Image (cartoon, rainbow, N blue to C red):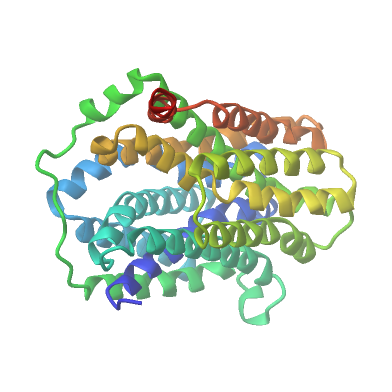
Amino acid sequence: MKTKTIPIFLAFLVMGVADAMGPMSDAVKNQFQLSNVMATLLPFFVFIAFALFSVPGGLLASRIGKKNLLLLGLGLNVIATAIPTFIDPGFALLLSCIFLLGVGTTFLQVAGNPIMFDVSPEGSYSRNLALAQGLKGVGSSASAYLVGLVLILPIFASMGWRGAFPVFFIFMSLAFITVATLKVKETKTDVPPSIGSSLSLLKEPVFALAVLGIFLYVGAEASMARFLKPSLEGFNLSPDNAALLGPTLFFSSLTVGRLVVGSFKMSPRFAFRVSAALGLLGVVLIITNIMPLALAGVVLGGLGFANIWPMLFSITVEEKPERASELSGLMCMAISGGAIVPLVMGKLADSGFGAVSYIVPLLCFAYLLLISLKKGKKTAEKELSAQEVQ
């Protein structure tokens, strides 16, 4: 492994901290006596930042550089995790910290994928990017597990729901230091993208459908992270076991799925279809509200959710590779689905729908399966050319 890639891998690892806001919502809900909808504002404030700052983050990277955008994102995350580490914030201040964490993580996402190309040896970019996505999954799993673990470890238990933040703060600070010492020669585009040129791509159906797919996928994943723990507590599991067998098992399966698919060469469209089908099946099993089937659904759901982002991203960019930077900004903007979709599921949960509220992620994955069956323009052209040759 080239030493220059290590700071970027660490940046991907700490991206997973944002995913802990879903599992943490339940503890915050109990602390502040909130409704499901109000508690879901934690992941909402993370993901709404993606809607507001993804495209501007891409423009900022073209002006100050990708490394500097990474440092800005990590700096914001250090501040966001430091405040709950050192003081006991009220709910309004906590939401401000979570929003700041969302902005920082947005900048990490926008800068992380392209700068990996700059630090990777020739021919290693795809493999390194797949591994980086796997490490992000490790960060998500570890962060979700830590949220449950703080309840039973004396060193953290005294801090209550804040117990995970000191660990988050340490890793954010370490990532900031390692990236700051990185020396990298960045590739630059001849013509920096603009907000107008990026948004104009949505006029083309193939890109609009893909961006909506990312919006629904991230929303479905955030809904699973937010509601799996309380759902499993309904089977009379203790909070720590519900966290372990819910969001932690889900993100662990997601990480395994990314690492496995990243190790084999296969058609992105085929992998996308298999992933969408597995995710849909997993959600169906959870809706049965039968514990063995629900646990199987958590594992299958994690495996299915794992590769929607990289497969749909690569398929979409293949349609117009010369606009990859602008498409990346739009894809990151669509991560805001993690803010909206869980609110809909939270409303159903507050209304007493129980396991039936998982109809929300089910509909999201039904859409993903549908668009996975649609052939892209480039794929259709290749098939037509092959038929003409024959």
370 and 90: which is toward the camera = 370
Percent position (x, y) of residue 313? 42, 41
Left or right of 98 in this view: 232: right
Which residue appears farthest toward the left when viewing the image?
190
The answer to whether residue 287 shows anywhere in this view is yes
The residue shown at (70%, 60%) is 249
Q: Residue lying furthest bottom in this view?
A: 155
Residue 35 visible in image: no
Say above or below: 313 vs 185: above
Dividing the image into 4 quarters, which one contains the N terminus? Answer: bottom left
Question: In the image shown, does 163 or 124 lie closer to the viewer?
Answer: 124
- Percent x, y of residue 70: 28, 59
| Left or right of 320 on screen, residue 309 | right
Which residue appears at 38% of the width and 26% of the height?
385
Residue 320's x, y, as percent? 30, 33
Hey, which quadrant is residue 343 in on the image?
top right
Q: Quadrant of the C terminus?
A: top left
Closer to the camera, 41 or 318?
Answer: 318
In percent of width and height, residue 271 lies at 56, 45
Lateral position of residue 248 relative to residue 19, left or right: right
Closer to us: 98 or 209: 209
Residue in the image at 33% along x and 60% along y: 125
Residue at screen point 37% across, 65% down: 11
